[in-house]
Amino acid sequence: GAVVSQHPSWVICKSGTSVKIECRSLDFQATTMFWYRQFPKQSLMLMATSNEGSKATYEQGVEKDKFLINHASLTLSTLTVTSAHPEDSSFYICSARTMGGNQPQHFGDGTRLSIL
Amino acid sequence: AQSVTQPDIHITVSEGASLELRCNYSYGATPYLFWYVQSPGQGLQLLLKYFSGDTLVQGIKGFEAEFKRSQSSFNLRKPSVHWSDAAEYFCAVASNQAGTALIFGKGTTLSVSS
């Protein structure tokens, strides 16, 4: 149980295009989803927290107009990297958790984004 | 502010030998602590978690961790390492379960030699 699916797993696109990454909870309702960014050989850095039906809360230094997050349902959150540039190339990972005490986050397999 | 320190960047262990990965946290109250494992190019898999109660927690794949409040530590252990355990290991802390996101340590890379 508690499976989180992330799609696509790898995307390569030209500079200036927008890329959408989906994060789905397959067998539970995710009241909260998190988006992380991971640089090579480094830890995960939280980008934003989204609660279903609410606007996402972005961490300091993360451009909300650059990284659009939508959490329209209890099983789906999307991250759109708008007008992507090479410096946006990274590994993006989502996680999801359901409401209630002692519920851990469950992570997707990540999306490797390469901007040419 | 909360923080997590994993002092060892890279550890190499012989297959069959025991393993201990260190994790120290900084947090005023009792934290919620986690260990995750990440294989190359993959997401994170939860190994185990500590919320309260017994300070020795058992996880998947034969891993265990012990919460020591006096040392602000939550070290991960395994009695006998297998080659498939080679991966990146992350310790993380959350201040509460009400949706607060995790703060990760920088990770420890485990290599297993034959």
Image (cartoon, rainbow, N blue to C red):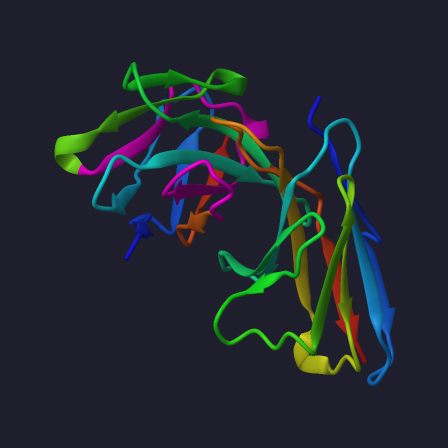
Residue plotted at (37% across, 34% down)? B32
Q: Quadrant of the C terminus of chain A?
A: bottom right
| Residue A45 place in picture, x, y as percent | 51, 60
x then y, percent, for residue A89 = 70, 72
Q: Give the left or right position of residue A68, taking residue B91 as reference.
A: right
- Please tell me which residue is depicted at 26% across the width and 43% down the height of the picture: B24
- Indicate the position of residue A72 as horizontal and vertical percent values: 79, 51
| Magenta residues (range) | B72-101
User: Which one is nearer the viewer's eye here, A92 or A50?
Assistant: A50
Residue B88 belongs to magenta span: yes
Apparent side of residue B110 relative to residue B73 in the rendered image (left or right): right
Give above or below for A51 relative to B22: below
What residue sits 77% from the left and 26% below the top?
Answer: A27
Q: Position of residue B70 (x, y in %)?
A: 12, 32
Residue farthest to the left, as pictured:
B70
- Along the viewing direction, whichever of B109 and B25 lies nearer the viewer: B25
Which residue is pictured at 62% across the width and 33% down the height?
A98
Q: Is residue B79 visible?
A: no
- Compared with residue A96, is residue B67 higher up or lower down, i.e. above or below? above
**Number of numbered discs:** 0
Residue A86: image quadrant is bottom right
